[in-house]
C-alpha cells in the first residue's frame, strides 16, 4: 500500500500560494501614477483641447472685459483693498471656467471609455474602485492646473502693460508654431514624433523669450499670488471633477453629452459670482441671488479669488476668518465624489442598470 506523505511546510506553502497577494503602497503609487500620466499624455496629444481651453477665457479677458471696463467697475470689496478694473475681477471666474470646462471634458472621456470598453479594463483591476476613480480625478485636475497657470502667465503680461514690440516678440514663436501645424495638417511633412518635439522646443523657446522680456523691460511682479492659489485650484478642480464623474455615470450615450453639458455648464457659470459681484445680483434680482448662493461654483470662484491674494476668506468683525468657501467646497467635493463612487458600483450604482462599466446604454 502506497502512502503519500505530505510535509507540513509543503502544505503551508501551497496555502500561501493560493492566497491573494496584498497590494503594497508601491503598487498603489504606480497605479495612480499610470492613470495620471495617461490623462496628461492624452491632453498633450489632443492639442486642440489645449487651445480651445484657453480661447474661451481669453475671449472674455481681451474682448468682454475690455468692453465692460467702464461699465462694470468693482468697488472695494474683500479681498480687494482698492477699486479694481473689471478684467482683474473676472480672473478668478475665468480660472473657474477653465476648471469647469476641463471637468466636463473629463466627463466626456469617461463616457467614451465606457462605450469603447476601456472603462471595464480599468475597473476590473484589483485596486479599489474608489481609488481608481480618485486617481483619474487627480489626473484631470493636473491637466486643469496646467491650463490655469498658462492662462495666469498670459494675464501677467497683459496686466504688466508691456511695450508693443514686446508683444510682437512674445507672439512670434507661437504664431510660427501655429502656421507650421496648419501647414502640416494639409501636407503632413512632419511625423507625430517630430510634431511633439517641435512643440516642446517651441515651449522652451517661448519660456526663454518671456523670461528675457521680464528682465529686459524690468516688469513688476504679478499683482496676484500665483503660489497660494494652487491649493484653491486643486480643491475647486476636485469638486468640479467629482461632479463630472457623477454626471458621466448618468449619461447613457455619447450623443447625449452636448445637451447635458449645456444644461450644467452655462447655468453654473452665469448664476455665480464669476462675472459680477453678488451684491450687484442681489440688487437686481433677489431670487437669482439665492440661486447663486446655492450654486457650488460660486464658492469655488470665491475660494480662488481670496487665494489669489493669499487669503482663505474675508476677515469678520470679531477678527476671525470666514471659512464658508472652504467648508462648502470641501463638503461638495466629498458629496459628489461619494455619489460618483456609488454610481460606478457595479452592484448598486447607476452603471449596474446598464450592464456594467463597459456596457452600452
Image (tube, rainbow, N blue to C red):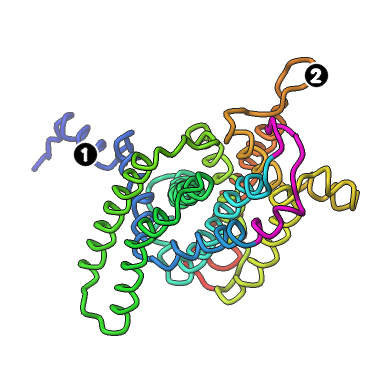
Residue 203: percent from left, percent from top: 31, 55
The answer to if 317 sits in the magenta stretch is: no
**Which label is found at residue 317?**
2
Residue shown at 16% from the left, 29% from the top: 9
Q: Mark 1 highlights which residue?
A: 14
Image quarter of the N terminus: top left
Query: Where residue 46 sits: x, y (%)?
Result: 39, 66
Mark count: 2
Instruction: Tell me the SS state at disc 2.
Output: loop
**Quick check: marks 2 and 1 in contact, CB under 8 Å?**
no
Look at the picture and state if 277 lies above or below 220. below
Which of pointers 2 and 1 lies earlier in the amino acid sequence?
A: 1
Residue 178 image-quadrant placement: bottom left
User: Left or right: where does residue 45 sit relative to residue 11?
Assistant: right
- Image coords of residue 63 (percent x, y): 62, 62
Q: Which of the 4 image quarters holds residue 6?
A: top left
Left or right: where does residue 170 sit relative to residue 330?
A: left
Decide: few, some or many residues near mark 2? Use Cα within 10 Å; few <14, some 14-19, many ≥20. few
Q: Main secondary structure of the magenta part?
A: loop
Question: Can I make out residue 172 in this image?
Answer: yes
> In the image, which residues are magenta?
64-83
Mark 1 element type:
helix
Q: Residue at x 29, y 61 (%)?
A: 199
Residue drawn where x is 77% and y is 22% of the image: 316
Measure how far apart labels 2 and 1 are at the Cα level. 70 Å
Q: Quadrant of the C terminus?
A: bottom right
Front-most of residues 6 and 236? 236
Q: Nearer the viewer, residue 38 or 305?
A: 305
Looking at the image, residue 350 sits to the left or right of residue 177; the answer is: right
User: Counting other residues with Cα less than 10 Å from the Cα at mark 1, is it few (<14), some (14-19), or many (20 or more)?
Assistant: few
Residue in the foreground of this view, choosing between 42 and 72:
72
Amino acid at each position: 500500500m502506497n502512502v503519500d506523505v505530505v510535509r507540513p511546510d509543503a502544505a503551508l506553502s501551497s496555502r500561501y500560494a493560493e492566497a491573494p497577494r496584498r497590494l503594497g503602497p508601491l503598487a498603489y503609487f504606480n497605479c495612480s501614477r499610470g492613470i495620471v500620466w495617461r490623462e496628461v499624455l492624452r491632453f498633450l496629444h489632443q492639442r486642440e483641447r489645449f487651445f480651445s481651453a484657453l480661447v474661451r477665457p481669453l475671449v472674455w479677458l481681451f474682448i468682454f472685459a475690455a468692453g465692460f471696463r467702464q461699465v462694470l467697475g468693482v468697488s472695494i470689496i474683500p479681498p480687494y483693498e482698492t477699486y479694481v478694473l473689471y478684467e482683474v475681477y473676472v480672473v478668478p471666474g475665468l480660472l473657474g471656467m477653465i476648471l469647469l470646462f476641463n471637468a466636463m471634458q473629463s466627463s466626456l472621456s469617461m463616457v467614451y471609455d465606457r462605450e469603447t470598453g476601456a472603462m471595464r479594463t480599468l475597473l476590473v483591476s484589483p485596486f479599489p474602485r474608489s481609488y481608481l476613480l480618485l486617481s483619474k480625478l487627480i489626473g484631470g485636475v493636473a491637466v486643469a492646473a496646467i491650463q490655469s497657470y498658462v492662462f495666469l502667465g498670459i494675464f501677467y503680461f497683459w496686466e504688466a502693460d508691456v511695450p508693443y514690440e514686446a508683444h510682437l516678440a512674445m507672439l512670434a514663436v507661437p504664431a510660427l508654431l501655429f502656421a507650421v501645424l496648419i501647414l502640416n495638417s494639409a501636407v503632413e511633412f512632419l511625423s507625430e514624433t517630430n510634431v511633439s518635439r517641435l512643440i516642446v522646443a517651441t515651449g522652451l523657446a517661448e519660456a526663454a523669450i518671456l523670461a528675457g522680456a521680464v528682465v529686459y523691460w524690468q516688469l513688476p511682479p504679478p499683482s496676484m499670488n500665483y503660489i497660494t492659489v494652487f491649493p484653491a485650484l486643486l480643491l475647486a478642480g476636485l469638486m468640479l471633477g467629482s461632479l463630472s464623474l457623477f454626471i458621466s455615470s448618468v449619461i447613457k450615450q455619447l450623443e447625449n453629452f452636448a445637451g447635458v453639458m449645456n444644461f450644467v455648464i452655462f447655468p453654473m457659470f452665469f448664476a455665480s459670482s464669476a462675472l459680477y459681484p453678488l451684491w450687484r445680483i442681489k440688487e437686481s434680482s433677489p431670487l437669482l441671488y439665492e440661486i447663486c448662493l446655492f450654486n457650488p461654483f460660486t464658492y469655488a470662484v470665491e475660494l480662488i479669488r481670496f487665494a489669489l491674494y493669499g487669503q482663505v476668506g474675508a476677515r469678520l468683525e470679531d477678527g476671525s476668518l470666514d471659512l464658508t468657501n472652504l467648508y462648502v467646497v470641501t463638503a461638495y467635493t466629498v458629496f459628489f465624489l461619494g455619489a460618483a463612487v456609488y454610481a460606478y458600483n457595479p452592484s448598486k450604482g447607476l452603471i449596474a442598470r446598464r450592464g456594467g462599466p463597459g456596457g452600452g446604454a
